[in-house]
Image: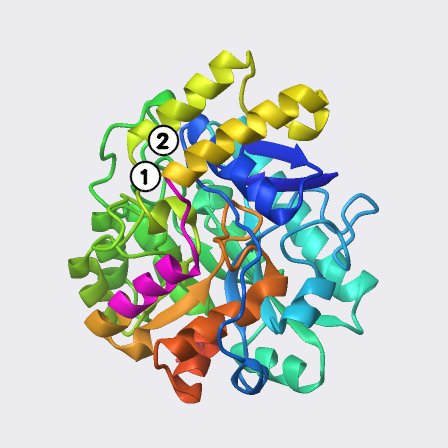
């Protein structure tokens, strides 16, 4: 049974299908839930990337984990996830930021306490992986130099990012505790406004207006200042445009967008427009282009409507586990999904690298990087899991990037920002 956490980070699709069939089924299931964030099928390597890929230090800045990560149920070594240690080794993915993600809920004392507890659960899981279960295979990086040291020792490297400053609640002291546990970037906001900043995607169900703070709040500014003091990178992915611009203005150190793409290529509110990208360049920061279908290729509403019609015709409701269907119903369901996918294909590796190209052309090679959002809805045809990581390098070679530039995209630019953030903290 394959279980992957997808899309809005609430939908769960389980299936015994191979990658290609699974992509066909899931890319539309998520649109039926109001999103289109599907991982993808295996791709073919057109250019042999091995010499350049093996020489590069490859770092993925956004890998989500489930709450039962690093337990008997989900073994980091070989669990059926898009990223596990075996897949990282086989795919030449040297390092990854494993994410402490907690979704937005209504802001109340009880929910703040629960968000903190959930964050601690994921911190503990990452530490179990690196400190107890597989310390001989993967180590935890607390500084940028640790990434290079661990990889130089022949181990994989893990770093920790927090997705959603909601886990801070209104207690600034929690930021120090998270830093001690290894958090080295914090995404200020997720889907829905929090006490730090406005989100690019407000949640009316929580009473969100289009804007609550007009960007970063006064408390958010204090959080950013403390992040600068500690040496935590400020992450503006998921933030509204004004929140992102405010964060760059307030921060004394460069900021990152840990998993975002380009608005001019994919007109999605989660992507960064040219003005914001240019501000990021002037700030000295980096955008980590994310391999996320619905951000890379904007699908027409007809695609989601076609999926809803299919589900209604078959008397099914999303999310669907094709493995639980009868043989006849499974076949009819997959044929229907295949026909829809043929008409409106999901994003592939080329669409992903198109966003990289645009960003490099606009703001320069020094300010662009790579992320997957594996485990949280990420993946495209050709880069569906860590095993297929060489395909990204192959496509970059085909586009004309040289070895030095490819290393910059994979890790050099992000590590440069991380070191500058450390320098600001040291001062």
Q: With respect to residue 410, does 97 lie above or below?
A: above
Disc 1 packing (10 Å; few <14; some 14–19; many ≥20) = some
Point 32% across, 39% down: residue: 299
Coordinates of residue 408 in the picture (x, y in percent): 41, 80
- Please tell me in which quadrant of the rendered image residue 10 appears: top right
Q: Are marks 1 and 2 in contact (CB under 8 Å)?
A: yes
Q: Is residue 28 visible?
A: yes
Label 2 residue SS: helix
Q: Give the position of the C terminus as an image quadrant.
A: bottom left
| In the image, residue 286 lies in the stretch drawn in magenta | no
The residue that label 2 is drawn on is 303
Between the residue at mark 1 and the residue at mark 2, the CA separation in whole angstroms equals 7 Å
Q: With respect to residue 86, does 331 lie above or below?
A: above
316 relative to 224 in the view: left or right: right
Point 54% across, 65% down: residue: 44
**Residue range of the region highlighted in magenta in the rendering:** 344-358
Coordinates of residue 75 in the picture (x, y in percent): 78, 52
Coordinates of residue 7 in the picture (x, y in percent): 49, 39
Q: Give the position of the N terminus as an image quadrant.
A: top right
Q: Nearer the viewer, residue 156 or 331?
A: 331
The residue that label 1 is drawn on is 299
Label 1 residue SS: loop
Q: Nearer the viewer, residue 199 or 345?
A: 345
Disc 2 packing (10 Å; few <14; some 14–19; many ≥20) = some
Coordinates of residue 194 in the picture (x, y in percent): 38, 38
Q: Is residue 414 visible?
A: no
243 relative to 223 in the view: left or right: left
The disc placed on residue 416 is: none
């Amino acid at each position: 049974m394959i279980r992957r956490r997808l899309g809005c980070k609430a939908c769960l699709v389980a299936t015994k299908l191979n990658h290609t069939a699974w992509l066909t089924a899931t890319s539309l299931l998520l649109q039926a839930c109001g999103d289109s964030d599907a991982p993808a099928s295996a791709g073919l390597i057109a250019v042999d990337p091995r010499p350049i890929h093996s020489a590069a230090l490859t770092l993925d800045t956004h890998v989500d984990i489930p709450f039962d990560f690093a337990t008997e149920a989900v073994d980091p070594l070989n669990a059926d996830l898009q990223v596990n240690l075996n897949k990282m080794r086989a795919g030449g993915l040297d390092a990854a930021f494993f994410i402490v993600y907690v979704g937005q809920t209504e802001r109340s004392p009880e929910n703040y306490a629960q968000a903190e507890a959930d964050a601690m659960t994921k911190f503990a899981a990452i530490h179990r992986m690196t400190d107890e279960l597989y310390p001989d295979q993967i180590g935890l990086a607390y500084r940028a130099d640790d990434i290079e040291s661990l990889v130089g020792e022949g181990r994989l490297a893990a770093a920790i990012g927090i997705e959603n400053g909601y886990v801070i609640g209104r207690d600034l002291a929690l930021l120090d505790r998270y830093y001690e546990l290894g958090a080295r970037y914090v995404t200020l906001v997720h889907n829905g406004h929090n006490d730090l900043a406005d989100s690019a995607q407000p949640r009316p169900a929580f009473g969100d207006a289009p804007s609550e703070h007009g960007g970063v709040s006064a408390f958010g500014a204090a959080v950013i200042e403390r992040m600068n003091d500690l040496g935590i990178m400020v992450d503006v992915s998921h933030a509204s445009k004004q929140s992102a611009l405010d964060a760059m203005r307030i921060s004394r150190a460069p900021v990152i967008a840990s998993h975002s793409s380009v608005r001019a290529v994919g007109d999605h509110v989660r992507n960064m427009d040219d003005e914001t990208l240019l501000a990021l360049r002037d700030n000295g920061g980096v955008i980590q282009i994310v391999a996320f279908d619905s951000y890379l290729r904007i699908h027409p509403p007809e695609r989601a409507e076609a999926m809803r019609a299919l589900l209604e015709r078959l008397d099914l409701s999303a999310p669907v586990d094709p493995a639980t269907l009868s043989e006849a119903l499974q076949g009819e369901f997959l044929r229907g999904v295949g026909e829809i996918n043929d008409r409106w294909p999901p994003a592939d590796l080329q669409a992903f690298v198109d966003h990289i190209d645009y960003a490099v052309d606009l703001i320069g090679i020094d300010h662009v990087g790579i992320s997957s959002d594996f485990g949280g809805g990420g993946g495209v045809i050709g880069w569906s899991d860590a095993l297929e990581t060489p395909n990204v390098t192959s496509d970059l070679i085909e586009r004309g990037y040289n070895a030095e530039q490819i290393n910059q995209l994979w890790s050099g630019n992000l590590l440069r920002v991380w070191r500058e953030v450390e320098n600001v903290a040291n001062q």
